[in-house]
């Protein structure tokens, strides 16, 4: 039985991934959160109702020592991490010249350094087992960039580069590493965008709607399954046709 760790599991996409996993009794699930432990515990309760093993853990992924303690807890309970979903992240909307230094550093600390911390620890388990699967949640803006979201775009571009590099480095160890770069997904993260701008996005999207968290969860479902045995280092972008590259 494999253990799946989802970071940022109480957010819209993270919660949808956990919901999807309820249909897969072949997994044990670790629900990570930064501050909403009550919701994380509720997600665990729902998974356990399906007869599956699940645990929650609260830590700040910016802090490597806290991440190490989480992995120690996971290893005591579930032996190791076999599948990692790097989903935790924050967004930031501002003109580039108006971005404060502390805000620039903060978004990199969460989105990039946090991904580095968790990936480094998970890869210890995967290398020992000569098997593993990592899915990084990036963004379409990491591919093409977004006006007013330069900091966010830069962090997601970094994750895309990391995904490709690690896939090349660890493919020889039977570790599959891909990224999903969603377009506009209907989650709380869109709260910083005006209603008018969202209407523009929908109008300019060939499929004429925002994405749903379930759209991303379904892609994760395939990427971590045995059906995906020969795809690694790829950046898959469910965006309704808003951007086609």
Image: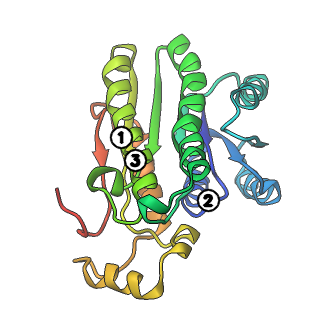
Q: Farthest residue toward the front?
A: 97
Residue at image location 47% in from the left, 14% down from the top: 130
Choose between 145 and 37: the one closer to the eye: 145
Residue at image location 75% in from the left, 54% down from the top: 40
Q: Secondary structure at mark 2?
A: helix
Mark 3 burial class by Cα count in 10 Å: few <14, some 14-19, many 20+? many
The disc at residue 154 is 3
Check disc 2 and report the residue beneath it.
15
Q: Is residue 134 above or below residue 7?
A: above
Q: Is residue 129 above or below residue 151?
A: above
Could you say where residue 44 lies in the image, as x and y percent from the top left?
A: 75, 52
Residue at image location 43% in from the left, 65% down from the top: 95
Residue at image location 39% in from the left, 39% down from the top: 158
Task: Say which label, 2 or 1, has the lower sequence index.
Answer: 2
Mark 2 burial class by Cα count in 10 Å: few <14, some 14-19, many 20+? many
Q: Farthest residue toward the top?
A: 128
Which quarter of the rendered picture does the N terminus lie within?
Answer: top right
Spatial distance from mark 2 to mark 3, Cα to Cα? 25 Å
Q: Quadrant of residue 119?
A: top right
Q: Quadrant of residue 216?
A: bottom left
Spatial distance from mark 3 to mark 1, Cα to Cα? 10 Å
Task: Say which label, 2 or 3, has the lower sequence index.
Answer: 2
Q: Is residue 20 above or below residue 74?
A: below
The disc at residue 160 is 1
Could you say where residue 118 lies in the image, as x and y percent from the top left?
A: 59, 31
Q: Nearer the viewer, mark 2 or mark 1?
A: 1
Could you say where residue 61 lies in the image, as x and y percent from the top left?
A: 67, 38
Answer whether labels 2 and 1 touch (C-beta < 8 Å). no
Choose between 117 and 48: the one closer to the eye: 117
């Amino acid at each position: 039985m494999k253990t799946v760790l989802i970071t940022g599991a109480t957010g819209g996409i993270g919660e949808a991934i956990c919901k999807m996993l309820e249909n897969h009794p072949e997994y044990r699930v670790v629900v990570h959160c930064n501050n909403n432990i009550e919701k994380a515990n509720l997600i665990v309760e729902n998974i356990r109702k399906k007869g599956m093993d699940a645990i929650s853990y609260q830590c700040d992924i910016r802090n490597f020592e806290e991440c190490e303690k989480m992995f120690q807890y996971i290893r005591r309970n579930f032996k190791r991490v076999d599948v990692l979903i790097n989903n935790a992240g924050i967004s930031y909307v501002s003109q580039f010249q108006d971005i404060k230094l502390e805000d620039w550093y903060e978004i990199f600390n969460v989105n990039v350094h946090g991904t580095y911390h968790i990936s480094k620890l998970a890869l210890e388990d995967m290398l020992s087992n000569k098997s593993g699967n990592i899915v990084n949640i990036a963004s379409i803006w990491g591919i093409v960039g977004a006006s007013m979201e330069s900091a966010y775009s830069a962090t997601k571009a970094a994750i895309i580069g990391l995904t490709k590099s690690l896939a090349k480095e660890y493919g020889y160890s039977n570790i599959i590493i891909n990224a999903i770069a969603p377009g506009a997904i209907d989650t709380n993260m869109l709260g910083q965008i005006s209603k008018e701008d969202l209407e523009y996005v929908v109008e300019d999207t060939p499929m004429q709607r925002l994405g749903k968290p379930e759209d991303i969860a379904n892609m994760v479902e395939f990427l971590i399954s045995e059906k995906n045995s020969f795809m690694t280092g790829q950046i898959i972008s469910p965006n309704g046709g808003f951007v086609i590259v």
